[in-house]
Structures are given as C-alpha cells and as structure tokens.
Amino acid sequence: MTYLRNAWYVAAWADELERGKLLARTILGDPIVFFRDGESIHALHDRCPHRFAPLSLGTFDGKAIECGYHGLKFGGSGACLENPHGPLVKALCVRTYPAVEAHRALWIWMGNPDRAKPETIPDFSFLTSVPDSAFNKGYIHGAGNYQLYIDNLLDLSHTDYLHKSSLGGGSMTRTSPKVSERPDGVVAVGWYAKNEVPMPFMVQTYPGQLDRVDSYIEVEWTAPSLIMLANGFTPAGQPITQGLTNKATHFLTPETPNSTHYFFAGIRDYQVDDVDFNRMILEQRTHTFAAEDEPMIAAQQARMGDADLWSLRPVLLNIDKAGVLVRRRVESMIAAESDPSNQNRDAKVPATSDIS
C-alpha cells in the first residue's frame, strides 16, 4: 500500500516514551525505535545494518542503543558510535526520522527529512488548555485500514445503531450532515439538531432534567489522518453557548495496510476538577471505541480482505459524502507526491473544483 509520507503522524502519546527506555512501533510499514536523549527525541529505523537484528531488542544507556546481537552502538544521528569488531565504516549507519513532541503527543515525519517543519504540525493545543482532571486519552491497536477508521468518524449516523446505549437516539440519522471544504485543505462535516431526543450520554452528564435538546457535532479532518471533533448541547430553546461542550482528537496512524494505531483524547468545559467523573468519561469512551467501533471495523476489514475499497464497488449513500471527499483528496496528494516533478516541493492539495 502507498501512503502519504511527507506528513506528520502521531507515533505515540508523549508519556509513552519514558526517559532511559526504548519504544518500538511500526509506522507506515517501517519499524521504528524511539528514545529520548535529554530534551531531544530520536527515531531510528529499527534494524541493525549488520545482520538486521531489531535495535529495540538491544540496550539503551541514555545516549545510544547497543545492538543486542553483536554489540554495535548507534546514537541519535544514526551513525555507529562503537564497533567492537573493527573500524567505524560509513556503511554502519541507520536511517533517522524527524520526531518532535507537541500537544501531548510524539510526532514523526516519514518522508523527506528536509521538508519536515515542526511548525506545520496542526494546532491541537486545546489538549493542553485544561487541567489533567479534565483531559483523558487512550490508545487502541486497531485491526483495520486507517481509512476505515476515518470513514467511521466522518459518518456519525452509525452512532444510532452501533452505539445505541451511549450515543443512540436517532438524532444523527434524522439530521442531514453539512459537508464543506476549507481553503487550507480541511474537510469539515457538521450535524446541527434542534428540539431532538437527547443521546443517553447527554442525559447522564447534564445536571438536571433533559427532555429535548439542541445540539451540534462538528468534525474536521486534516490530511492525512488527523481528526478533531467538537460537540455541545443544551436544553431545547436555550442558547447553545450556555450548554456543555466537549472537544476530542482522533489520530489514525497506519501501521500496516490492515492495522492502525488509534490515539484518542478529549477535554471538556464542565466538572473540570472532578477526577472520578473524568475516569468515568474515559472508561465510556474507551468502551465505545475498543468494544464497539474497533470490532466492527476489524470485521469489515476481514470481509474486504486485501481488496481496495473502490475495487469492491461500494454502493454509496448521501452519508458517505465527507468520507469519499477525503479519500479522493488523499489519493490525489499521494499521486502528486509520487510525481517526480513534485519531489522538491510539497504535494499540492486539489481544489474543490478538482473533485467531483
């Protein structure tokens, strides 16, 4: 499978990478080993150039990795620092990848390192705008292609059926999504409901009687696989600005064609100091994603096998508009990146008029 490589992907939550330890993870099919050296984060191809042993199975002294097979040592630059069997020849080196920490996450650039600019990481700073008691996060190792997870988040009508006990009620099916495409390449989809049946989680979290609600859910996709979701609700007829609001991120990083690293997080503007409530929200969110979404997507992937989605000729519905638009944009960006004439510049995102 071909991926968009000149882009920032989330490789881990920042606190997964502990000082003095190694973290191994496969990203876009490439085995990577991460470590911290002081304030710097390093990402190396997880394969010794000698006999191809995983460097992540070696030992780390805080500065360099010693290969567990024959003792060669490699630093953050990828160069061999010590060869107990002979001279330090130039060929004894491993590939490195730009990696930085931002917005509570560890980010990696999988393409041309000369084009890796940390300032182009999308702004998810809202994740650090609340105390830890109003922030929660999780990780799922998903058995499905990353684009299936993106499809799932861009069509929330499935919540009425797959998540009946928490997000059901029928309002998403009864509310037509509004899809738009911004000049910066972001694809947005929103659901705006008036005087609707509240979802079960709304009744559970609202401090008072809640019979009918006005609500909104807005989802924004940023290439290639970053999702921001915001939602708010209030008793019907009241200003939506007076309601409860939540904001969440869903970072879908391809591991292999049929597996995905799923990083999710959320914040809220109510009960921000309630640690027990925060734990309950995380447990519910984790159950929704791990026990409902992931098994369905894994089963979907199993039925598809290794076939490309378009080759199976899916029957598209109006609820698929945002997902189709995103898939076409990613395909166009990958094609542009693969074009030799574009190798010295960023892949151009097609304009709205270029997509039917």
Image: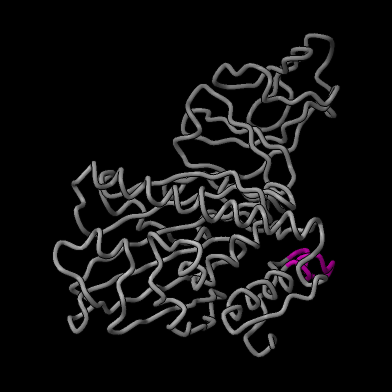
In the image, is 309 to the left or to the right of 271?
A: right
Residue 203 lies within the magenta run: no
Residue 341 lies within the magenta run: yes
Stretch of the chain drawn in magenta:
334-344
Foreground of the two, 238 or 160: 160
The image position of residue 11, as x and y in percent, is: 57, 44
Task: Give the quarter of the figure containing the C terminus.
Answer: bottom right
Foreground of the two, 303 or 229: 303
The image position of residue 230, as x and y in percent, is: 37, 67
Which quadrant of the structure image shows residue 88?
A: top right
Task: Give the quarter of the figure containing the N terminus.
Answer: bottom right
Residue visible at 26% across and 77% down? 213
The image position of residue 131, as x and y in percent, is: 25, 47
Residue visible at 49% across and 34% down? 16
- Identify the image's colour scheme: rainbow, by chain, secondary structure or one colour: one colour
The image position of residue 263, as x and y in percent, is: 51, 49
Residue visible at 81% across and 56% down? 306
Main SS, magenta residues: helix
Which quadrant of the structure image shows residue 3?
A: bottom right
Please tell me how many numbered marks the rendered image carries: 0
Q: Is residue 227 above or below residue 218?
A: above
In the image, is 340 to the left or to the right of 228?
A: right
Residue visible at 65% across and 21% down? 65
